[in-house]
Image (spheres, helix red, strand yellow):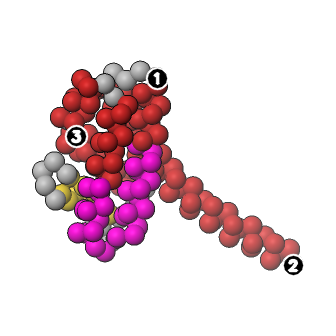
Amino acid sequence: MKNLIVLTFLVIGIVFGAAATGNNLVEQRANNLTDKMIRELRLNNYQSNKVREINLDKATKMLAAEKEFAGNQEMLDQKYKAISAERDRELERVLSTVQYNSYFGSRNVLTKFDQQFMAELNKSEDKAPVAVTSGSESDATVSTIN
């Protein structure tokens, strides 16, 4: 009986630990990108908090898309493009015109920064390698190779 209880708690711990790792990855990805945007766009506290919320939401959606469309690169690219367009619309409401123009002009640099971060993170956590793919030059995306 004691063994069954211990085993049950062990399984629950593993399940919640795996879920927390996924959430931690999303938070790390969002925070890394947000911190760079805060520095480069010179965001105030209100903007910083809003941009962090937006990036967390988009990183969550990207991770879900990676899981859902793992074997279908075309669908994954379409989903990434839609998520990026959604991020652009939301950021346009939060940033000043000058900040948004700066952001929009440096999206490729920010995308590459995010890709490098994810590649390093995946390498350090010994996960599947990351592939950089793109539908067009301005819509570079990252996906996990299975």
Residue at figure coordinates x 16%, y 48% from the top left = 138
Q: Are marks 3 and 1 in contact (CB under 8 Å)?
A: no
* Quarter of the image with the C terminus in it: bottom left
Residue at the farthest right position: 1
Of the numbered discs in the image, which one, if any, rests on residue 135? Answer: none
Amino acid identity at mark 2: Met
Residue 70 sits in which quadrant? bottom left
* Marks 1 and 2, how far apart at CA: 54 Å
Q: Which circle, 1 or 2, is nearer the viewer?
A: 1
Tell me the SS state at disc 1.
Answer: helix
Residue 4 image point, x, y percent: 80, 77
Left or right for 39, reference 132: right
* Among the two numbered marks 3 and 1 on one chain, the one whose residue lies closer to the N terminus: 1
Q: Which one is nearer the viewer's eye here, 140 or 79?
A: 79
Q: Is residue 132 magenta?
A: no
Left or right for 21, reference 12: left
Residue at figure coordinates x 29%, y 49% from the top left = 84
* Marks 3 and 1, how far apart at CA: 22 Å
Q: Which residue is mark 3?
A: 107
* Among the two numbered marks 2 and 3 on one chain, the one whose residue lies closer to the N terminus: 2
Q: Is residue 117 in sight in this rendering?
A: no
Q: Which residue is mark 2?
A: 1
Height in image: 51 above or below 140? above
Height in image: 44 above or below 72? above
Residue at figure coordinates x 26%, y 30% from the top left = 100
Magenta-tinted stretch: 55-82
Residue 74 image point, x, y percent: 23, 69
Prevailing SS of the magenta stretch? helix
Q: Which residue is mark 1?
A: 45
Residue 73 sits in which quadrant? bottom left
Residue 112 image point, x, y percent: 23, 45
